[in-house]
Image: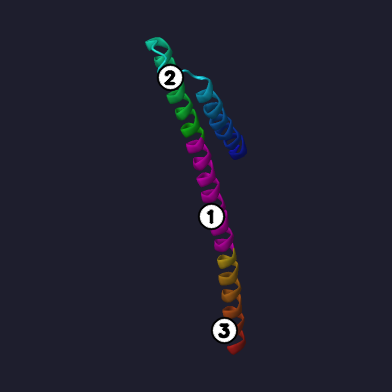
Amino acid sequence: MVMKHGVLVVSGILLLLFGISQLTMGSGSPLADAFALTWVILMLFYIMANARQMRRMQEQRRKRMEAERRLEWLAAERKWKKEQMKMRRVKSVSLQ
């Protein structure tokens, strides 16, 4: 999914670059100028929205990986404590 949004960001930038060269700004027609300005703003919103979604998905992935790492650490810690308790029981039984 992150790659999808990355492709969309790149396509938005390319559309913006190619579109700006085709748009006629300052041609004297207020309707053409309004269209050109609206189109540029729309493309900027498109790029920003996809970039934001891409960053959000990367952050979610990082948090998910961190949570998995913590669960693995917790499981290893519990296993270690269980082994320590067994060793203590064996020592206390052998001493009696």
Pointer 1 residue: 66
**Amino acid at circle 1:** Glu
Residue at 49% from the left image edge and 41% from the top image edge: 56
Image position, residue 37 (x, y; %): 41, 21
Pointer 3 residue: 92
Horizontal side, residue 89 vs residue 39: left or right: right
Q: CA distance from mark 1 to mark 3?
A: 39 Å
Is 94 situated above or below 71?
Answer: below
**Amino acid at circle 2:** Met
User: Considering the numbered disc 2 on the image, is that residue within a helix, a strand or a loop?
Assistant: loop
| Residue, far bottom | 95
Quadrant including the C terminus: bottom right
User: Considering the numbered disc 1 on the image, is that residue within a helix, a strand or a loop?
Assistant: helix
What range of the chain is rendered magenta? 51-75
**Amino acid at circle 3:** Ser
Q: Nearer the viewer, residue 11 or 68?
A: 11
Quadrant including the N terminus: top right
Q: Which mark is residue 41?
A: none
